[in-house]
């Protein structure tokens, strides 16, 4: 895509077409990455061992924290790159890109070291039992202690490319890594490694696929930097303006907190669920993988929307910006309603995909599937309001409103969702705990809409002054 094509995309292309141009490749990559994230659970489930499935549920929370670091510099830096492009500040955009890249390297190495030093106590806090701890250690060592750097750089590279208008290239890199992981999983788990090493094999496949994706992103960033305001040169990172550095963190920190608190909420959920039993923990792990289908599509819509909203906010084209926000909202809500119906009708066969009932643990597997089916039918009802939380948060990030993004993230998880877990678990037990997501997301969605309305009112009043 040349400079004129990018200008048309951001400024004059019909809104549905512009949104589709950015969102469809992102949705495809999100779905492929969804497949490669759930494929670990799928193939491990072929063993019929519920304890292996439960161990990945515990370990995956640690792995998913890497996404928050990717958002810190990916969304923080990427959204600022789009706004700087809207203002015509190309050189500053290059500095922001380089700063985000090297910042991601630093925080990745720090996180890997932290997890390596305190892995056992962290697993205990997350609810690992004697039956699941060994498997969880294998998964974390490969995907986090060794794998955080390529995982984070892949995400940051994708955000930077997407926000500069290179959505297809970003999606190709993420999708390619996902496809490779899908191919390597069964090879390592059932061919090259002995029985009992299935969790290690899945983790090794994830590590190698993320390394390949990372290398692709670095090469692509270098290549497109000849035409786009992107850079990986250390010199550009050093000359970043103090104002722009603050701009990266103003949006990046709330975005990272948003993702991090989502994982913190899952930590509380896993700990409370583990108190009910390992089979219930395995069941919620299956459900959290299955319910990522609407989340993946809607995050793809939001990430595709963000660069164009940010560009038009910075350039002052409020009419186009508002049209993009409305169009993305309509599409997202439509998809979530469809997904609710889909899960209600097909909950049992979906859950059966993740756990075999033909092995030596058939009775435990059947009980786990029964729990998972009930959990999925309840939790999927939260999908529409969950989308409203994502959509509103991405709108605030696109417009550089880090304060309200942070306020929303804190309220959504710490004020609403986690307290509802404890309240409903104490009142209604297991099903109350599963239902807490509906109440938490509904309250968070209402609060998010209030924050967005207040921000737009403030911005419009300032523009008229």
Image: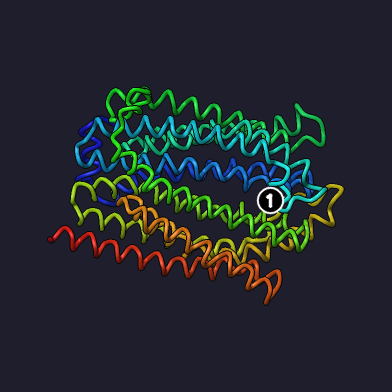
Location of residue 187 with respect to 259 vertically, above or below: above
Regarding residue 334, the answer to whether it shows in the image is no
At which x and y percent is residue 67? 52, 43
Locate the N terminus and report the quarter of the image it occupies: top left
Q: Residue furthest right?
A: 360
Regarding residue 67, the answer to whether it shows in the image is yes
Q: Residue furthest bottom?
A: 427
User: Could you classify mark 1 by the number of other residues whose Cα lies within 10 Å: few (under 14), some (14-19), or many (20 or more)?
Assistant: some
At which x and y percent is residue 429? 71, 72
Q: Residue furthest front?
A: 242
Horizontal placement of 78 versus 337: left or right?
left
Location of residue 155 with respect to 391 vertically, above or below: above
At which x and y percent is residue 464? 13, 61
Location of residue 435 with respect to 342 vertically, above or below: below
Q: Residue furthest left?
A: 465
Horizontal placement of 242 versus 219: left or right?
left
Locate the C terminus and report the quarter of the image it occupies: bottom left
Decide which of 195, 350 is in the foreground and name it: 195
Q: Residue at x 35, y 68 (%)?
A: 450
Q: Residue at x 45, y 43 (%)?
A: 71
SS of the residue under disc 1: loop
| Residue picked out by circle 1 | 353
Decide which of 457, 372 is in the foreground and name it: 457
């Amino acid at each position: 895509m040349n400079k004129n094509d990018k200008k048309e995309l951001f400024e004059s292309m019909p809104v549905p077409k512009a949104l589709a141009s950015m969102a469809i490749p992102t949705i495809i990559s999100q779905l492929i990455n969804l497949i490669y994230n759930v494929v670990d659970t799928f193939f491990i489930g072929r063993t019929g061992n519920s304890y292996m499935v439960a161990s990945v549920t515990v370990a995956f929370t640690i792995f998913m924290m890497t996404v928050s670091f990717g958002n810190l510099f990916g969304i923080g830096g990427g959204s600022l790159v789009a706004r700087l492009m809207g203002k015509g500040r190309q050189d500053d955009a290059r500095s922001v890109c380089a700063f985000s890249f090297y910042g991601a390297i630093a925080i990745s190495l720090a996180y890997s070291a932290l997890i390596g030093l305190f892995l056992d106590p962290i697993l205990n806090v997350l609810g690992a039992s004697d039956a699941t701890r060994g498997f969880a250690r294998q998964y974390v060592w490969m995907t986090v202690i060794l794998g955080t750097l390529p995982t984070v750089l892949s995400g940051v590279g994708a955000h930077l490319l997407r926000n500069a208008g290179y959505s297809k290239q970003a999606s190709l890199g993420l999708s390619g890594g996902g496809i490779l992981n899908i191919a390597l999983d069964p090879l390592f788990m059932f061919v090259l490694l002995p029985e009992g090493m299935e969790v290690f094999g899945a983790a090794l496949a994830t590590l190698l696929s993320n390394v390949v994706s990372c290398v692709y992103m670095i090469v692509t960033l270098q290549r497109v930097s000849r035409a786009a305001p992107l850079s990986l040169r250390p010199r550009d990172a050093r000359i970043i303006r103090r104002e722009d550095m603050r701009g990266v963190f103003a949006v990046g920190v709330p975005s990272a907190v948003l993702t991090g608190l989502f994982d913190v909420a899952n930590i509380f959920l896993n700990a409370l669920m583990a108190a009910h039993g390992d089979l219930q923990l395995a069941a919620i792990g299956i459900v959290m993988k299955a319910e990522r289908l609407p989340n993946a599509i809607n995050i793809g819509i939001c990430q595709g929307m963000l660069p164009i909203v940010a560009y038009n906010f910075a350039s002052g084209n409020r009419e186009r910006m508002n049209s993009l926000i409305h169009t993305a909202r309509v599409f997202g809500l439509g998809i979530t309603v469809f997904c609710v119906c889909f899960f209600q009708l097909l909950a049992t066969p979906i859950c059966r995909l993740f756990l075999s009932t033909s092995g030596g643990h058939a009775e435990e597997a059947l009980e786990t599937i029964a729990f998972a089916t009930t959990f999925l039918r309840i939790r999927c009802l939260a999908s529409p309001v969950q989308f409203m939380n994502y959509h509103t948060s991405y709108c605030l990030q696109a417009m550089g409103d880090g304060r309200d993004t942070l306020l929303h993230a804190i309220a959504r998880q710490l004020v609403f969702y986690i307290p509802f877990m404890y309240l409903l678990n104490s009142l209604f037990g297991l099903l109350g705990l599963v239902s807490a997501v509906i109440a938490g997301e509904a309250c968070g969605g209402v609060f998010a809409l209030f924050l967005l309305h207040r921000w737009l009112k403030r911005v419009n009043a300032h523009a008229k002054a």
